[in-house]
Amino acid sequence: MSTFLRPTAPIAEDALLPGDPKRAMDLAILLMDRPLMSNLARGLWGYHGRTADGLELTVQSTGIGGPSAAAVMSELVALGVRRAVRIGTCRALVPQLEPGALLVADTILPADGAGIALGGREALRPHEGLTRGLLAKAATEGGIVVSSDLHYDPDAIRRDAEWRRRGAVAVELTAAASLATASAAGVDFACALVVAEGDDGEHLSDEALDEAALALGAQAAEVLSAVPRASEPAAPGARAPQGLDPGA
């Protein structure tokens, strides 16, 4: 039995994981035909339905930070999720990433308590096939993302410099804990982010952020539909995103 989630609808094998409950609702409305609310407990809104491509999908909010995301990920695994894509936001560490840019994490550096406790301090690698699919679909480049416990960091200048020395281009709050939890259970995990804040402190407007996150979620759903699970062949006639090898 779940401790935090209280499913009132089926949980699909494929999931999108935004942090924000409202974004979960907006994604469900955008992507699904007549979505059902699958979780209301603890304000972690979740939804179940089918996309236009026929993909059975769960969209589940994870809350703020690694501990919440790890708990949600653990319970989703127990409920049958086999693949998950985080749809989130990040803060840029380099000027090349302007607010509104899309970033697919090809490497995740744990610098948060939950991520380190669950996966150690070494770099973590998201699922290759899903990551390649997201890169092709979003027409963007991958980058190293660091997960931190601190959104309001009094020592940000020093910490940001250290993360840049390790090659990180952005920082966010939950990916390392989510990936470590998923990997330990044999669940495929990838991470796609919208840059909400530039390295100079410039913020993306709420409206532009919502629009970019919904577009990114729609692309992630298409990738989940196109990329076969490791245990199954590609569906007859299924089309992969441009540039994606569905056998990866």
Image: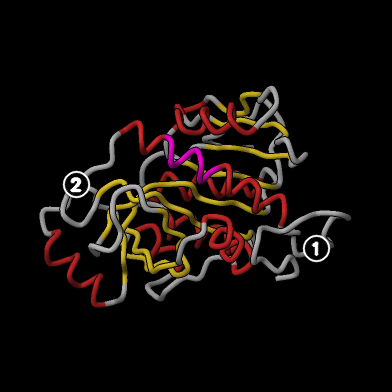
Element type where label 1 sits in the image = loop
Disc 2 crowd rating (10 Å Cα; few below 14, some 14-19, many 20+) is few
Q: CA distance from mark 2 to mark 1?
A: 44 Å
Label ID, residue 202: 2
- Report x, y in % for residue 50: 73, 34
Circles 2 and 1: CB distance less than 8 Å? no
- The range drawn in magenta is 211-217
Q: Which residue is mark 1?
A: 231
Question: Magenta-highlighted stretch: main secondary structure?
Answer: helix
Question: Is the residue 239 above or below the residue 129 in the image?
Answer: above
- Give residue 55's quadrant in the image: top right
The residue nearer to you, when weighing 82 against 49, is 49
Q: Amino acid at mark 2?
A: Glu
Q: Is residue 13 left or right of residue 120?
A: right
Q: Is residue 205 left or right of residue 231?
A: left
The residue nearer to you, when weighing 162 against 76, is 162
- Report x, y in % for residue 130: 61, 61
Which of discs 2 and 1 lies nearer the camera? The answer is 2
Residue furthest to the right: 236
- Image quarter where the N terminus lies is top right
Question: Is the residue 163 above or below the residue 227 in the image?
Answer: below
Upstream in the sequence, badge 2 or badge 1?
Answer: 2
Element type where label 2 sits in the image = loop
- Report x, y in % for residue 49: 70, 31
Q: Image point 72% across, 59% down: which residue? A: 240
Q: Amino acid at mark 1?
A: Ser
214 drawn magenta: yes
The residue nearer to you, when weighing 181 against 208, is 208
Disc 1 crowd rating (10 Å Cα; few below 14, some 14-19, many 20+) is few
Q: Image point 37% across, 73% down: which residue? A: 121
